[in-house]
Amino acid sequence: MLRISEEQVVERIRADNPWWVPPNQINPRISRMRPRAYFDLVLNLIRQRLPKRALILMGPRRVGKTVMLWQAIKSLIQDGVSPTSLCYINIESPLYNGLGIEQLIKLGSKASGGGKDEPSFFFFDEIQYLREWEVHLKTAVDTYDKIKFVASGSAAAALRLKSTESGAGRFTDFMLPPLTFFEYLDLLGKNDLVTIDDSSARPQFSARDINALNEQFIAYLNFGGYPEVIFSEEIQANPGRYIRNDIIDKVLLRDLPSLYGIQDIQELNSLFTSLAYNTGNEVSLEELSQNSGVAKNTIKRYIEYLEAAFLIKIVHRVDRSAKAFKRANFFKVYLTNPSMRSALFAPLKPDDDLIGNLVETAVFAQWFHSPNTHLHYARWNDGEVDIVSLRGNMTPDWAVEVKWSDLFEENPKKLKSLLYFCADHHDCKVMVTSQTKESVKTVDGVTITFQPASLYCFLLGYNLIRGQTNRSHAQPVKAVAATDQ
């Protein structure tokens, strides 16, 4: 039986590092791509030498992790770092099967030519496919004082768990989620649809043309989660082929089975399809089990896997008094990226019946970029509030009701559930999204900020990327008429 030779591996590493050969450039297509708004944050962590830690860049498939690594390599070369001291290895390549991190470091050093330009930056892409990577990477961090290690992976929760367990004090985790609406407009060069006044401590946002902004928002809901999709009319004409086949199926058919030993892939796929169709709706283990014929414990385990793969996010319920239920029998499920629903079924139009669920999913998707934000929804016998954020003492800090309609801005007394909830929680700040209207109104002693859902998603993404999570809640912002240009 023929075995892969060391020289074949070395040649593959050289092929993956074209910047080692003059004119020391990476793929021209990558060079022309505009970086995501998260890029500067990631690049600063890559440049950081103290404290001595490996950077673990996590996120679902196709959100731009590999491109970000290449863009970082380009920036380091521009900073004066020797090209041959930057080594990139994609662990998904079959040639690396059975090799450990120690071997890859030695082969990478040999491939680059060694000597004074021996790699001082190692980039391991899709590191989850290396067995016990977390143990060996920790050892490498301790052993190689002059090397900065950067690893990426698509199994976010699994990577984070192993990073926390084995890499305490040695790893820095960074989550790169799907595009926010702010990033979507930024990559398309359409951020001028929103005016930002950041002259004060708290930026003010207004839409130049709310109809034009909403048009882009609908496109974001249907196609906007992945950088590659937003630039391709061909993919947008058939999003199911790209998102379902290249992203979802790879996770369901390859990543999850290989990482968790799942046997019944069809069962898992069927559950995910059902959850995706019901994004934004309340479900229960009992209901899911009855409809599928799968045991509740198995359903629960599958849901944990789907969350680990960053395909869905579970949001738990509180009652009208904001108290959690002793048994979490009911919960809401949200896709981490609204465009996955359109890919699985069909793109939605602004007036479709289910568009409200997708708008609500988009709002939650912006908040998923803030791992320290713990959101709930409130529900009782005759009422519900879509989003409730609780303080440390489990009292409501702020609440958001997500609407894709101007009806409630025009007649806020129709927000009966929200008003009932706030009557019990006087300090709770309140935001209600609309389709086009923006205002601040007081109803029954409750001050309600109304803001278009598209503008609200934009400001969430803007603030969260800048680390201003404490300012991204439902506070009143500058009210601008929807017709202002």
Image (spheres, grey):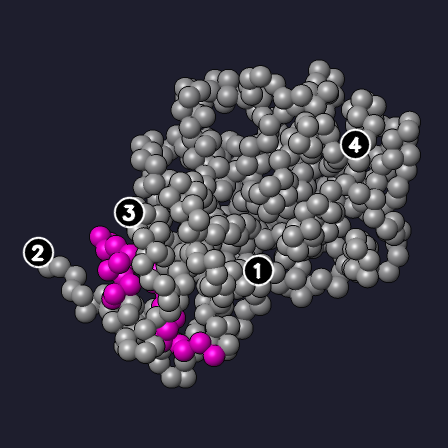
Q: Position of residue 59 (x, y in %)?
A: 48, 50
Give the amino acid at mark 3. Answer: Arg
Give the amino acid at mark 1. Answer: Leu
Relative placement, left or right, of 233 versus 475 is left
**Tag shown at residue 131:** 3
Give the amino acid at mark 4. Answer: Cys
Q: Which residue is mark 1?
A: 41
Instruction: Specify which label sits upstream in the sequence, 3 or 4.
Output: 3
The residue lying at 42 percent from left, 56 percent from top is: 54
Residue at mark 1 to residue at mark 3: CA–CA distance: 29 Å
Q: Secondary structure at mark 4?
A: loop
Q: Which residue is at the front of the view, 438 or 342?
A: 438
Residue at mark 4 to residue at mark 2: CA–CA distance: 69 Å
Residue at mark 3 to residue at mark 2: CA–CA distance: 24 Å
Q: Which residues are magenta?
A: 80-107
The residue lying at 51 percent from left, 17 percent from top is: 286
Give the amino acid at mark 2. Answer: Met
Residue at mark 2 to residue at mark 1: CA–CA distance: 47 Å
Q: Would residue 207 be visible to someone looking at this image?
A: no
Instruction: Specify which label sits upstream in the sequence, 1 or 3.
Output: 1
Q: Which residue is at the front of the view, 135 or 266?
A: 135
Q: Which residue is mark 2?
A: 1
Judged by depth in the image, the label closer to the viewer, 2 or 1, is: 1
